[in-house]
């Protein structure tokens, strides 16, 4: 086990301990760090309005984006259990978007959702909508464009949900149907409890990745910001896509405030751990495992 222990210590433990130390310093990567105590944390919580805006945007993405991905993944996987022929082809088609690199997918969606020349708004206009959304160019709809991008690439979650659905014993549906349960009742009282461990797994992974949401928001904000400089491009328009990880990156690698960025990273770590622990704590109420089904 020594190679793994050495690698874990050098590449995980040491950087974490170092960042914890840097979070109490003023450090710009070019000069020696200066110890400032809790000044970074004090400034973060009391004097930095962009910090709270990034927190709100991130919580919105975790609450709305992750929830919709789970719902859409369950619905898509359920639909894919219906075909009698060509099931593998349909599943492959739904999974293919997941193979697209995040940067390429984000750039493609910036074009697809372009308010002037994008095919989506042209289609909405042809259907009679007088004022289609501006998507990434409006602070009110920018995050919804990112949500659509996430739903388009839901194939990874869909595959896991599909495996859970196919593992549900057929005799449970037959017994419920004999008792007079309709389609919705079978889904509510048989399917959902039986796939609750899969929902739990996707929820935990979705929350963790949601708090670290970066690539798509970074690419979309820079691509739609026009000729603005990098410091103004991140989070465009009007900070609506300024997520926590994007703001952390800006502080650390644009302004070289590495001490402040380290403090932000530790706050993010603690928030993610707290939310994950809360999900685990409440899972006993709604997650059912095999013989524990009631």
Image (spheres, rainbow, N blue to C red):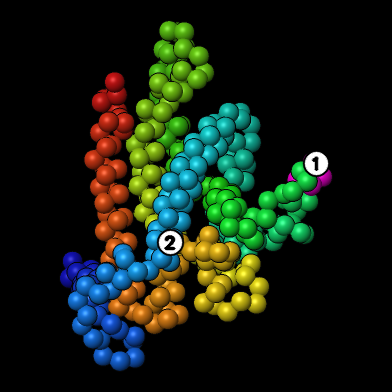
Q: Is residue 96 visible?
A: no
The first of marks 1 and 2 along the sequence is: 2
Residue 166: give x, y in percent of width and height.
Answer: 46, 32
Asked whether, in this view, residue 128 is left or right of residue 91, the answer is right
In the current view of this chain or complex, which residue is farthest to the front? 47
- Between the residue at mark 1 and the residue at mark 2, the CA separation in whole angstroms equals 36 Å
Asked whether, in this view, residue 283 is left or right of residue 79, the answer is left
User: Residue sitting at 56 percent across and 72 percent down?
Assistant: 233
Q: Look at the picture and state if 132 lies above or below 213.
A: above
Which of the 4 image quadrants contains residue 58? bottom left
User: Residue sitting at 61 percent across and 76 percent down?
Assistant: 228
Q: What is the number of the mark on residue 128?
A: 1
Query: Which image quarter is the C terminus in?
Result: top left
Q: Is residue 254 magenta?
A: no
Residue 76: give x, y in percent of width and height.
Answer: 55, 37
User: Residue sitting at 38 percent across and 44 percent down?
Assistant: 203
Asked whether, in this view, residue 73 is left or right of residue 5, the answer is right
Q: Is residue 127 magenta?
A: yes
Q: Residues within 10 Å of mark 2 (few under 14, many from 20)?
A: many
Q: Is residue 280 visible?
A: yes
Q: Look at the picture and state if 47 lies above or below 174.
A: below
Q: In terms of secondary structure, what is the magenta stretch mainly?
A: helix
The residue range painted magenta reads: 124-128
Q: Look at the picture and state if 117 lies above or below 14.
A: above
Residue 86: give x, y in percent of width and height.
Answer: 64, 36
Which of the 4 image quadrants contains residue 12? bottom left
Disc 2: which residue: 54
């Amino acid at each position: 086990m020594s190679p793994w222990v050495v690698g874990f210590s050098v590449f995980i433990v040491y950087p974490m301990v170092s960042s914890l130390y840097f979070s109490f310093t003023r450090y710009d990567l070019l000069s020696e760090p200066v110890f400032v105590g809790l000044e970074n944390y004090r400034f973060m919580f009391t004097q930095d309005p962009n910090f709270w805006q990034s927190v709100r945007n991130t919580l919105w993405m975790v609450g709305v984006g992750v929830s919709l991905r789970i719902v859409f993944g369950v619905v898509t996987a359920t639909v894919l259990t219906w075909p009698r022929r060509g099931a593998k082809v349909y599943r492959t088609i739904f999974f293919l978007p997941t193979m697209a690199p995040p940067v390429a997918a984000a750039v493609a969606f910036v074009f697809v959702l372009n308010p002037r020349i994008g095919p989506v708004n042209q289609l909405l206009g042809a259907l009679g909508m007088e004022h289609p959304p501006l998507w990434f160019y409006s602070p009110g709809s920018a995050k919804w464009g990112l949500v659509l991008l996430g739903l388009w690439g839901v194939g990874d979650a869909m595959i896991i949900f599909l495996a859970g659905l196919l593992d549900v014993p057929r005799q449970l549906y037959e017994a419920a149907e004999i008792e007079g349960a309709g389609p919705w009742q079978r889904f509510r009282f048989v399917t959902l409890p039986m796939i609750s461990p899969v929902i739990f797994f996707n929820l935990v992974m979705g929350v963790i990745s949601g708090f670290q949401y970066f690539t798509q928001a970074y690419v979309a904000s820079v691509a739609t910001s026009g000729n603005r400089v990098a410091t103004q491009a991140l989070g465009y328009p009007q900070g609506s896509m300024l997520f926590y990880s994007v703001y952390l990156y800006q502080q650390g690698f644009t302004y070289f405030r590495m001490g402040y960025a380290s403090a932000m990273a530790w706050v993010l770590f603690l928030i993610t751990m707290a939310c994950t622990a809360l999900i685990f704590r409440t899972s006993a109420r709604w997650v059912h495992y095999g013989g524990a089904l009631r």
